[in-house]
């Protein structure tokens, strides 16, 4: 019985060797993951500028809202925002019943109109001017300020390069601990993603005039992760 078993084992070994040769994948590999980051200053700010109006007549509520919304758009244009960087994010008309001093419905209603404009500002140094101009124009709802980058390629390249270096360091340490040496790179898988800071919410009075609210864009962190497979000798 020993001869047939030995023959089977030899055949299995030849089959496995043949599979490795056909696929070109080394029989022994080491897989490591590396991480890298790049810190950059944002160059784009987005913010939502809103106006709410109220009137006993729905047509008047809409007309007042339209007037202020137009002023807000003109104010945004005045600080350099193009029409392509403005879009209507929300528009709503709704009614609420009126109540007397005892909490009983009077049968009358008030009409509310909400209109929100999302603005993309491509010069973050003008954010304070934009916010104050919007308030002066009649905006009574400002929220959702976020900072981003128009082009993240350079930051992604920097973060990816750092991640590959980190992967090599990890691979060298593991190979040394295992008593082996690294060969050629078999494959590299990459993925890049950003971690923006928390949105900024300005706190300032809604009265017109005076200097704009202080703003601070902070920084953005672009992170990259790579998975590298090395041949092990």
Image: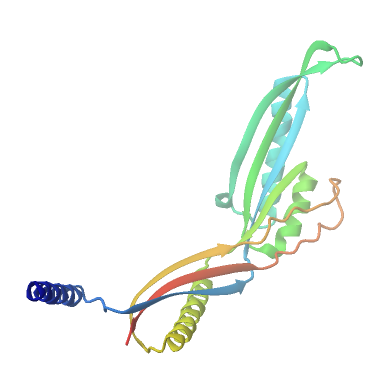
Across and down, in percent, residue 226 comes to 45, 72
Q: Is residue 168 left or right of residue 204?
A: left
Q: Is residue 103 left or right of residue 14?
A: right
- Work out whether residue 118 or residue 25 is closer to the camera in this orientation and state it: 25
> For the point 53% across and 75% down, which residue is it?
36
Residue 150 shows in the view = no
Q: Residue furthest top?
A: 107
Q: Is residue 126 left or right of residue 35?
A: right
- Work out whether residue 65 or residue 179 is closer to the camera in this orientation and state it: 179
Residue 21 shows in the view = yes
In which quarter of the view is residue 210 placed? bottom right
- Work out whether residue 17 or residue 165 is closer to the camera in this orientation and state it: 17
Q: Residue furthest right?
A: 101
Across and down, in percent, residue 15 comes to 14, 73
Across and down, in percent, residue 117 comes to 64, 43
Above or below for 110 versus 64: above
Above or below for 144 versus 149: above
Report the coloring of the rendering: rainbow
* Position of the C terminus by quadrant: bottom left
* Position of the N terminus by quadrant: bottom left
Across and down, in percent, residue 54 comes to 77, 27
Above or below for 45 versus 97: below
């Amino acid at each position: 019985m020993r001869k047939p078993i030995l023959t089977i084992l030899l055949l299995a070994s030849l089959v496995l060797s043949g599979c490795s040769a056909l696929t070109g994948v080394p029989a022994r590999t080491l897989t490591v993951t590396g991480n890298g980051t790049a810190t950059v200053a944002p160059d784009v700010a987005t913010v939502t500028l809103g106006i709410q109006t109220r009137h006993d007549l729905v047509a008047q509520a809409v007309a007042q809202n339209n007037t202020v919304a137009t002023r807000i758009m003109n104010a945004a244009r005045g600080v350099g925002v193009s029409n392509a960087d403005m879009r209507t994010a929300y528009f709503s008309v709704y009614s609420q019943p009126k109540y007397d001093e005892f909490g009983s419905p009077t049968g009358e209603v008030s009409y509310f109109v909400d209109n929100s404009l999302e603005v993309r500002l491509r010069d973050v140094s003008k954010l304070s001017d934009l916010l104050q101009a919007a308030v002066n124009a009649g905006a009574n709802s400002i929220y959702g300020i976020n900072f981003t980058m128009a082009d993240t390629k350079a930051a992604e390249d920097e973060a990816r390069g750092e991640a590959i270096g980190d992967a090599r360091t990890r691979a060298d340490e593991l190979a040394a601990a295992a008593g082996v040496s690294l060969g050629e790179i078999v494959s590299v898988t990459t993925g890049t993603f950003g971690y923006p800071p928390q949105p900024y919410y300005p706190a300032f009075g809604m009265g017109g005039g005076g200097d704009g609210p202080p703003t601070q864009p902070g920084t953005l962190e672009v992170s990259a992760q790579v998975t590298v497979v090395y041949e092990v000798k």
